[in-house]
Amino acid sequence: MASNSSKAVVSFIVGAAVGVAVGYFLNSDKKDEWVDKLKYQADKLKDKFNKKKGQYEDALENELA
């Protein structure tokens, strides 16, 4: 079983690696490109959701009529 001190060291190293990755991402030139891609994908997902929601509402309305 690993001791508490070795767990702490591993946690520190993982935290530092994540911090470096986030710092690199925030300072990279591709940040804006990634954000635009994420916004585009979120808009597509929202449109799909709204389309399905409308279909289910219509089906429910027809079922209750």
Image: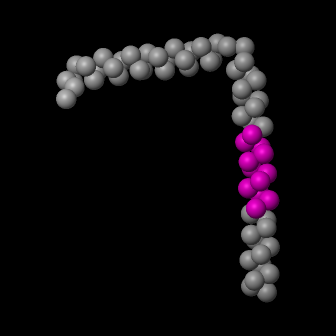
Q: Is residue 12 left or right of residue 62?
A: left
Question: Residue at coordinates 72% horizontally, 26% vertically from top-left?
Answer: 34
Q: Is residue 34 above or below residue 46?
A: above
Q: Main secondary structure of the magenta part?
A: helix
Query: Quick check: is 59 in the magenta stretch?
Result: no
- Percent across and percent down for residue 31 are 70, 20
Name the foreground residue: 55 vs 2.
Answer: 2
Q: Is residue 37 above or below residue 51?
A: above
Protein image colouring = one colour
Name the residue at 19% across, 24% down.
Answer: 3
Using the image, determine if residue 42 lies above or below residue 17. below
The residue located at (75%, 83%) in the rendering is 63
Quarter occupied by residue 27: top right
Q: Quadrant of the C terminus?
A: bottom right
How far from the left and from the top, in percent, is residue 33? Answer: 76, 23
Image quadrant of residue 50?
bottom right
Rendering coords of residue 25 (x, y %): 62, 18
In the image, 19: left or right of 35?
A: left
Q: Residue 29: x percent and y percent?
A: 72, 14
Count all numbered tags in the image, as a single digit: 0
Region of the chain picked out in magenta, as a range: 41-52
Q: Is residue 42 magenta?
A: yes
The quarter of the rendered structure image containing the N terminus is top left
Which residue ends up furthest to the front in the rendered image?
1
Residue 12's quadrant in the figure? top left
